[in-house]
Amino acid sequence: MPEKNPAVDSNPAAASQTVRDSTTPARRAAVVVNPAKSGGEELKGAILRLCETQGWAEPLWLETTVEDPGAGQAREALEAGVDVVIAAGGDGTVRCVAEVLAGTGTPMGLVPLGTGNLLARNLGVDITDPVSACYDVFNGSDKAIDVVKARLNRSDDEQVFLVMAGLGYDAAIMADTVDVLKDRMGWLAYVEAGIRKLPGKPVKATISVDGGHPVRRRIRSVMIGNCGRIMGGVEIFPDAKVDDAVLDLLVLAPRGRFGWLGVVAGIFGRNKSETESVEYFQGKSAEITLEHEQEFQLDGDHLGTGTHLVVTVEPEALKIRMTAAAV
């Protein structure tokens, strides 16, 4: 006769829980991974072992490609009905996965593998150890964050970003950063590109926030932030919060020979303040029209050039699965 478990026999509720635990399917994750940044099979093996130890089923492992950097894989994960979709890569992978998951209710986890990892940095996710970050996903809870929808050149297609969009100088930096230097120097590679791109002509811009009275400036760059922190830990949008349902705009308009010194003082100075070279705006939507085409970027991805951009915040449209301690 089988040996009885006294604890279960004396507690019907415990017996019922035992039955539920034995019949409830294990939770399952999908990992959308950029193979160029994953370091080969080592990471996959580590995550498979982690799933075993944490009681999760074997994950759906989906690698991105040059042709499909994450959106198709995220849709496949949704169709499979997984409990969480983990974006394992850089900010580009995260953005592509988020574009599909936003508004679905299925949470996204972050396993940072890129150079910037800006969303992860802003959320306090561990960027030093991918396996530790994955552990935090498996044992975390959901945090709702805003996403921002962008339409370039009056297109009907909307694209999502989570950290920052830019027209002008900052996007030119993203377009011209040398990949080899990124691998060797990390975020300092962007500094090198920024120095090379300092010379340039301003462009006439019209900026309207929340449909209000337009302001006109001669700008080098307009940046729209959903988070505050960029590479190097710089707090470029000091008032930005990822869940405040507000967009933060930064207009760079250096004037004269020493105009960039005013930009540096306005952004990086200990006492941040608006100058004639730096202006901040806040709102739920913004429209920017430029006289001439400028480079365009979303979350560090260079996406061409444009003269017209409309951005709108979607409050708490995306769930992030993470540990509460990391917030």
Image (spheres, rainbow, N blue to C red):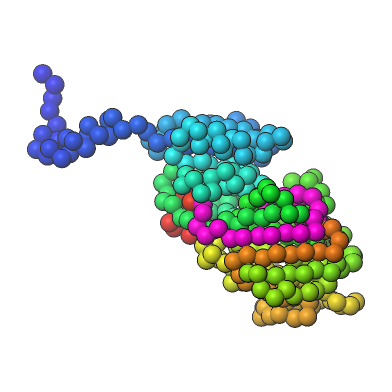
Q: Nearer the viewer, residue 110 or 250?
A: 250
Q: Is residue 259 left or right of residue 156?
A: right
Q: Is residue 311 magenta?
A: yes
Residue at image position (78%, 46%) is 179
Q: Is residue 133 above or below residue 41?
A: below
Residue appearing at x 73%, y 73% in the figure? 214
Nearer to me, 44 or 241: 241
User: Which residue: 67% across, 78% down?
Assistant: 272
Image quadrant where residue 168 sits: bottom right
Q: x, y (%) of residue 88? A: 58, 42
Residue at point 66%, 55% (across, down): 150
Establish if 53 lies above or below 285.
above
Q: Quadrant of the N terminus?
A: top left
Q: Position of residue 178 (x, y in %)?
A: 81, 49
User: Quick one: which residue is furthest to the top in this view?
Assistant: 1
- The span shown in magenta is 295-318
Please provide percent x and percent y for residue 2: 13, 21
Magenta span main SS: strand
Q: How many marks?
A: 0
Q: Relative to residue 86, is residue 186 drawn left or right?
A: right
Task: Please state which of residues 142 and 303 is positioned toward the viewer in this rendering.
Answer: 303
